[in-house]
Amino acid sequence: MNDMLRLLETRRSVAPVALSGNPPTRAELEILLRIGSRVPDHGKLTPWRFIVFEGDARERAGDIVAAAFAAKEPGAEPTRIAAERKRMTMAPLIIGVVSTAAPHVKIPEWEQQLSAGAACMNILVAAKAMGYSGAWLTNWFSYDRGVLAQFGVREGERMAGFIHLGRAETIPDDRPRPALEDIVTYFTGEPS
């Protein structure tokens, strides 16, 4: 098996809380973003864009999340608000992938949304190839228009996900994967 296939076969998510170390360098980040943009894109619409959360800006993003959570849950314990604040600071780097899918005369929005998902996956695979680990997550605030607006997500755009990246001290055991016989059928053209 070649190295690329081994990488794809062994890639797995690592929770942000288990990520540490230095974030990707600026040169590595540019490679990740360039690879993130090399996905199928019917009509060359570029129906996604990236928001990078790095350094102290992660703490400011965490403050936005915590404030929105406290407003939604006025009776929340301070420890719970503090936990919400940490969501944007656990990983050394976060890349927000924004779906900019919109109605188009020829290209269905669904295809545009799938392209944004492919961008997320390309970033994760490229990060693994660089020796980083990561997780593609959405949390409640991925759907909160107030939080998203403060992150720079415009009306009509949606979060495809937040890609949390860093170094993993240990890689967790793999989760059970579906048996191919449970998820694969072969079209034969014969009547059922």
Image: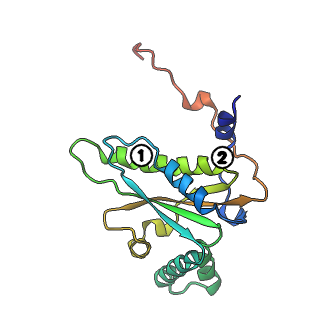
Q: Nearer the viewer, residue 46 or 17?
A: 46
Q: How many callouts does the rendering have?
A: 2
Q: Where's the C terminus, which quadrant? A: top left
Q: Is residue 155 visible?
A: yes
Which quadrant holds the N terminus? top right
Q: Position of residue 77 (x, y in %)?
A: 61, 85
Whole-percent x, y for residue 139 in the image: 52, 65
Crowding at dot 1, Cα within 10 Å, few <14 / some 14-19 / many 20+, comes out as: some
Amino acid at dot 2: Ala
Query: Where is 62 relative to 91, above or below?
Result: below
Query: Residue 164, located in which quarter of the rendered image?
Result: bottom right
- Tell me residue 62's x, y (percent): 55, 77
Disc assigned to residue 114: 1
Give the image location of residue 130, x and y in percent.
66, 50
Q: Which residue is painted at 58% across and 31% down in the image?
A: 182
Residue positioned most to the left: 105
Q: Nearer the viewer, residue 58 or 139?
A: 58
* Residue on which disc 2 sits: 129
Q: Residue at x 39, y 68 (%)?
A: 153
Q: Element at badge 1? A: helix
**Amino acid tagged 1:** Leu
Q: CA distance from mark 2 to mark 1?
A: 23 Å
Residue drawn at 65 percent across, 36 percent down: 4
Residue depicted at x 57% and y 58%: 29
